[in-house]
Image (cartoon, rainbow, N blue to C red):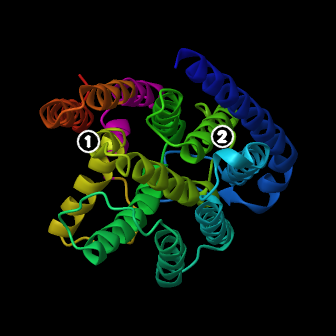
């Protein structure tokens, strides 16, 4: 058992390292072109004051999928029945990356952009194994509909929350790192384990270019497919009987985006328009610096990762619910801090 875990750790470490090197190398090559053709100009949602190149997510996605597919090719017997599902995920992520890149450059209308998101998520849901069911108490069609809308929401959450330097890094690194560790422990199957390690390395390769004050943004070309990937990885975890862990890991992201959207709907504000009412955005207006915000998000996400591991280790409904409740309290505390004026 220990030797098997060490072997997995070595493989995943190599996957992450190669993805990191490829991602950072591609960014160095692409950045001059992005600076000419894909500038993010300040708008009502922005936290930056100067036009900044965006589209770094293209390098992150290329590195993630290239290294994951290479690992699958080198370990063909270990992923015997999942290639079709991963091919569908790859195609869907490419579609979202293209939609995001076009939006980065030309600002697409909301309706066709959302319709193409539906297409991409529909491809992923249609390719899920027929026997996959997280809540057997529900009819299969109801659960699949829930998964569809949940993944669409997750795609948009990642986009909404990518609003300040290092915010997506602060979310993806603890989440992908936790999923990689769960793969080492044998909790997650090989394919999502490889994808999580590749995504972890790729986002770390992007991180130096996005540190405050950022020289490069992910852009929608990165945030949209990253949202799909994170949703799919969490679905893979939940399908192994660890629903509580899958809910705990993204809890801050989901809470900030969902509470904000609910508040805007209650105030009858146009939810499709750019705004600065997310809790992390309000924190910048309330006197917090970007590094201070990101540091708090990282610490909370690391704590959520620890709680997710506890829920998996507990192997009981009571233990899982206790870990989930602790995560909810922790995230509520952070949102309250962000909403309060800094003294």
Residue 29 in view in this figure: yes
Looking at the image, which residue is at 38% across and 59% down? 275
Q: Which mark is residue 265?
A: none
Quadrant of the rendered image containing residue 294: top left
Residue sitting at the far left: 318
Assess whether mark 2 and mark 1 are in contact (beta carbons under 8 angstroms): no
* In-image side of 98 versus 303 (left or right): right
The Cα–Cα distance between marks 1 and 2, rounded to whole angstroms, is 24 Å
Q: Residues within 10 Å of mark 1 (few under 14, many from 20)?
A: many
| Label 1 element class | helix
Secondary structure of residue under mark 2: helix
From the image, tell me which residue sits under label 2. Answer: 198
Q: Is residue 244 above or below residue 111?
A: above
- Is 95 on the left-hand or right-hand side of 177? right
Q: Is residue 270 visible?
A: no
Question: To which residue does mark 1 refer?
Answer: 244
Residue 278 belongs to magenta span: yes
Sequence-earlier tag: 1 or 2: 2
Nearer-the-camera pick, 185 or 275: 185
User: Which percent across, then down, holds residue 337?
Assistant: 23, 31
Residue closest to the eye, 2 or 317:
2
Q: Residue at x 32, y 40 (%)?
A: 252
Q: Is residue 240 magenta?
A: no
The kind of secondary structure the magenta stretch mainly shows is helix
Q: Would residue 97 be found to the left or right of residue 21 on screen?
A: left
Seen at 15% across and 67% down, the residue is 266
Question: Where are the magenta residues, as a range?
Answer: 277-301
Q: Give percent across and percent down for residue 51.
A: 66, 51
Q: Quadrant of the C terminus?
A: top left
């Amino acid at each position: 058992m220990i030797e098997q875990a060490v072997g997995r750790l070595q493989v995943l470490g190599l996957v992450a390292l190669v993805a990191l090197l490829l991602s950072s190398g591609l960014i160095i090559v692409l950045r001059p072109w992005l600076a000419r053709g894909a500038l993010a100009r300040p708008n009502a949602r922005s936290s930056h004051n100067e036009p900044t190149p965006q589209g770094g997510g293209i390098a992150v996605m290329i590195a993630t999928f290239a290294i994951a597919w290479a690992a699958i090719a080198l370990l063909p017997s270990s992923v015997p029945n999942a290639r079709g599902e991963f091919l569908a995920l790859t195609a869907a992520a490419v579609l979202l990356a293209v939609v995001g890149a076009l939006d980065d450059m030309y600002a697409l209308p909301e309706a066709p952009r959302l319709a193409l998101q539906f297409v991409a998520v529909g491809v992923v849901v249609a390719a899920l194994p027929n026997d996959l069911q997280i809540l057997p108490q529900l009819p299969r069609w109801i659960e699949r509909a829930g998964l569809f809308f949940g993944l669409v929401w997750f795609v948009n959450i990642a986009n909404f929350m990518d609003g300040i330097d290092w915010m997506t890094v602060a979310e993806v690194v603890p989440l992908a790192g936790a999923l990689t560790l769960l793969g080492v422990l044998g909790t997650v199957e090989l394919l999502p384990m490889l994808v999580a390690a590749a995504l972890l390395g790729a986002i770390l390769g992007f991180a130096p270019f996005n540190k405050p004050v950022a020289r490069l943004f992910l852009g929608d070309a990165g945030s949209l497919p990253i949202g799909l990937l994170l949703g799919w990885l969490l679905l893979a975890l939940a399908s192994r009987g660890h629903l509580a862990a899958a809910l705990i890991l993204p809890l801050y992201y989901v809470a900030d985006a969902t509470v904000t959207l609910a508040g805007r709907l209650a105030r009858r504000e146009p939810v499709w328009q750019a705004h600065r009412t997310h809790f992390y955005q309000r924190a910048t207006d309330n006197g917090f610096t970007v590094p201070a915000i990101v540091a708090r998000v990282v610490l909370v996400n690391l704590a959520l990762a620890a709680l997710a591991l506890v829920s998996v280790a507990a192997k009981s409904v009571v233990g899982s619910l206790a870990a989930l409740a602790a995560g909810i309290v922790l995230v509520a505390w952070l949102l309250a801090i962000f909403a309060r004026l800094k003294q």
